[in-house]
Every structure is written in structure tokens, then in C-alpha cells.
Amino acid sequence: MRDTEQSSELRDGDVVLGDDWVIPQDPESAELRARRSRRTLFTLRNSPLARKIITFNLIALVILVAGLLYLDDTRKERVQQTARDLIGDAQLVSNVFEAQLRQVAGSRDASDLNVKATLAGLSIPEGGEVFVYDSTGTLIGWTRGSSTVAELPGLIQAEADVPTGSTLISDALTAVWNGLYSVFTTGSETEAPTLAQRVQDIIPNALDGHMQVHAVSDAAGDTVIVAASPIVLDGAPVGAVAMAGPAGEIDALARKEQERILQMFVVALLVSVGLSLVLASTIANPLADLAAAAEMGKDRGTGVNPGRIRIPDLSARPDEIGRLSRALRGMVTALYNRIDANEQFAADVAHEIKNPLASLQSAVGTLRMVKRDDQREKLLGVIEHDVRRLDRLVSDISNASRLDAELVKEQEQPFDLLKLIGNIGQYLGEDARSKGIDYITDLPSKPIVLNGLEARLAQVFVNLITNAISFCEENDAIRVWVRQRENRVLVVVEDTGPGIPDQALTKVFKRFYSQRPAEHFGNNSGLGLAISKQIVEAHGGVIWAENIRPTEADITSDPQGARFVVGLPL
């Protein structure tokens, strides 16, 4: 068993990773499964809901990756670390030149030193550069960490810490950006300054005796960290040393970190799209089935319903779609039940109206032929009786047909049930006593407050009490009593009349059914108890009829009266 037993074991928090939750016993399951078997993930492209799910998931992922790229401090930390290293190296080189100046007698400027020989003895990372300036800001020496420097033989080299590895995604995005930039930018481009020109701009501040650190761009657009330190002799700057890190090292490291994030983004993108498709299939496909089933019952061209709507039974799903399926199936069932009831009601109305009409037709036809006055008066009495019967029947039918709409429109309000029954008893009790019938009430002392339609429930109790009065004779009694139980209240109307035939106990609440003596024929439409049952059930209650017997052990004993019980929830 997979239907009710399985669904009862599932909890609200269970995860549904598929849409194959069809009750096997359901008649339309085979057709539904066949339609699902023809589906693929690509069919979801026609689903706006699926597109929204995928789009929103991708937007969230893009925002997350953009935030990671924006908050990534790798470049900033690398710049700071490189700047600290270059400051130390620049100060170390300037100290070397200061020591040499002190050894040269009468030297007052860095130009008096053998700068080329000193630079040749330095160990410079590959790609790094060293600039030496005199007190006038003129470049007097330069070297670069390289494997081949012809003019500086004997230079000691060191490997640069530049990350290696492929950065395909970053390079592709950079190429796209540069392409868009070139398309949307107009005008002639000016030649970018070289690194030497950038360094030249910061040397004046270093010659003033201040340490300088700047991040500049070379002619190729790569970021280069430059640190400049003054060469001080006897407290006065006599030159400056500037050291530049390897060009593009910072950018390469940043691209490498961005590449890792973008690679993770690509993987997450594929996983997100796949999961979104699965999620969309579990939501969009069942909803499409429900919508298709609802639309299948209507021919768009003619507006004619070729058959009954059959909603797929997805109630085995432990989620909102399962609830929606159950709700739609319940609504469709209730709708068709209402349609069937209306059809039956129309048939019953036609049948009930035909009887007095046939009697009227017969009486009118006979009236034309009789000559005696007493017979004519008798026929006129029959006609008058049938007209009143028709009038009463039409009025009751009108009230019954409006009842459904009025029950939906009216607003439930709290009211005191005992006060309502007491007011009814004051009016109907006098009517019963005028006919020699005892009217007895047994009501609790404390109020019982119900939430419902007071006027409609009053109609129910009036119908029950007036029915009891109509079946009672002189010296009979009617007893109305109320008892409150845990979560409900019982209102009981008893009488000592002839009771109800056993075969009629299940029929008395049907429309147009009346079990009355022959002398009362035509005085009741048979809708009172049917209307009462409809009102009680609209309040979530129950109503039934039973006979009062001297002993419950002997069901064949003659009844001592009838009892109608109304149970209403508190």
C-alpha cells in the first residue's frame, strides 16, 4: 500500500526529490505516468515557474561570488607585505651607500660613488629593479633582476615569487572587458608613462628625507610597488634609492585567487542549475498536471464541458502540492456533488409541482361539467387548497434554493444558545399550551456561547418544535433540554406523539419527504427537516432522529414518542 499508509508515515519536513507521487489505484495514474515518462529536463524551458526558480537561484549565487570577489583582501595583503619587504630592502641599500660615502674622503654626493659596482653585488629578485639618484634627482644607476643583463655582469639573481598556473576564466573575462572597453571608448589613447618616469615622480619627496612607498603602473599597465629611501650623510640627504618589485606579481597573484573563486563559481553554477532543474521538476511538473487537468474539462473553442474534470491524485506527496491536490479534488468532488444535488432538487421540484398542478387541472376540468352548487363549492375548495399548497411549496423551494448562498454570505457571531432557545420557547410554548400540550424546558443555569449564525439555528429549533407540536395531540407533552459535553452541546426536542416509523428514520431529512396523517396532506412541503439538516451541517454539527421506547432492549416495542437530537461544536 502506497497511498494512505505511506502518506501517514511521512512528515511535513520530509524532502521530496521527485514528482512520481501518484496513487497507483487512481484511474488517471496510467495516463499521468505516461505523460511524465515523455518529459525531459529540456521541457522545463516552457515553464515560467522553472525559469524563475533557476533565475533566482543564479542571482543569489552571482551575488555571493561578487561579494567574495569584492571582499577578497588577498591583493591588499600582498601589497602591504611587498611594501614592507621593499622598504627594508631600500633602507638596506641606502645604508650600504651611506657606509661607502663615509669611507670616501670629501664625498658629499652619491654621484661620487661607484654605483655600478655596488649594484652588481646586490641580489635582486627576478623582475625587480633598483634606481639610484643623486641629490639633484638625476638617475645615476639602475639595475634589474634578470637572468641576462649584459651591462652588469656578475649580478647575483634570485627567483621571484610569482604564482604560476592557468587563469583561463580570468583571462577570458579580462579579454571581454577590454573588448567592451575598446568598443565604447573613443578618441586617441595617450602613451602610458614608463616605470622610470613613475619612480622619478616620487624621488623629490625621498630627497626631502622621507621614506616613500607607492603602488604605480608601468607602461604595460601592471601594478608595481615602489619604495624610495633617502641616502643620508651627516643628517642631510645626498641621494636616494628606489626599489621596485617585479612587475605584474601583485596582479598575477590576484588573478590566481580570482581564478580559484571563479572555478568554484563554475562548479557551484553547474550544481545550482542541476538542483534547480530537479526542484523545478518537482514543483512545476505537478502543478502543470493539476492545471492541465483543470483546463481539460473545458473546450476553449465551444466552452462546452466534454466530461468531468479529473484532478490527478498527488495526495501522497508530503508537501503543499499534495495539500493542493487534495484540496482541488475535494473542491471538484464538492462541486459535482452540488451539481448532482441541484439536478436531483430540480427533478424533485418538478415532481412536487406536478402533483398539485394535476389536481388543479382535474378540478378545473370537472368544474366546467358539474351543475350542482354543492359539488362546485367542493371543487373550489380543492382548487383553493391546491393553490395554497403551490404557494407554500414555491416559497419553501425559494428559501431552500437561497440557503446555500446565504450561509456563505452571512457572518458568524457569538451568541448565547440558552437565551435563543428560551426566547423560542416563550413564543412556541404558548402555542403548544393553547392546544392542550405540555411544553417543558430543561436548560443549564450557566450560559452556553456558540459561534455561528443565530437566525439560522433559530430556524432549525423552530422547525423541530413546530413539527413536534403538529404531531402531538391534547394531553401530549414536548420537552426541550440542553446538555453541554466536552467540546459540543446537545439540543434535544422530545415529544409523546406517535413517533416515527422505523423505515422513515433515515428518510425524514430528505427533501420533499413527509410522513404525516392523511388529514394533514398538502399542509407541509417536506423541506423543513432537510433545511434544518443543511444548516446544522454548515455549522459543523450533526442532527438525527430516533424513537423513544419504554426499553432499549426491545426494539419491537411501540414508540412512546419521537426525539430529534442536534449536536453542535463549541
Image (spheres, rainbow, N blue to C red):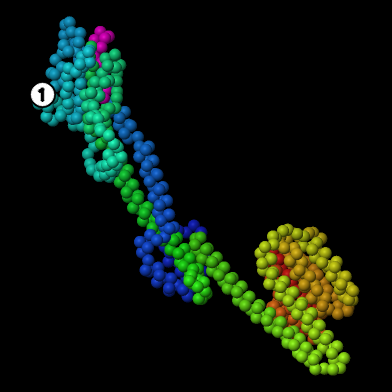
In the displayed structure image, the side of residue 513 where residue 428 appears, left or right: right
- Toward the top, the furthest residue is 106
From what the image shows, is residue 424 above or below residue 78? below
In terms of image quadrants, where is residue 191? top left
Q: Residue at x 69, y 60 (%)?
A: 411
**Is residue 207 in view?**
yes
Disc 1 residue type (three-letter): Glu
From what the image shows, is residue 189 above or below residue 138? below
In the displayed structure image, the side of residue 4 where residue 419 appears, left or right: right
Q: Nearer the viewer, residue 82 or 60?
A: 60
In magenta stretch: residue 227:
yes
Q: Residue at x 43, y 66 (%)?
A: 20
Secondary element under disc 1, as helix, strand or loop, is loop
**Is residue 218 in view?**
no
From what the image shows, is residue 87 above or below residue 106? below
In magenta stretch: residue 415:
no
In the displayed structure image, the side of residue 288 where residue 527 appears, left or right: right
Q: Residues within 10 Å of mark 1 (few under 14, many from 20)?
A: few
Q: What residue sits right under mark 1 in the picture?
A: 151
Q: Nearer the viewer, residue 531 or 364?
A: 364
Q: Position of residue 425 (x, y in %)?
A: 83, 67
Q: Residue at x 75, y 70 (%)?
A: 460
In terms of image quadrants, where is residue 220? top left
Q: Quadrant of the C terminus?
A: bottom right
Read off the magenta span. Answer: 226-237
For the stretch drawn in magenta, the main secondary structure is: strand
Q: Position of residue 518 (x, y in %)?
A: 79, 86
Q: Residue at x 74, y 72 (%)?
A: 565
Q: Nearer the viewer, residue 46 or 90?
A: 46
Q: Position of residue 37 (x, y in %)?
A: 38, 69
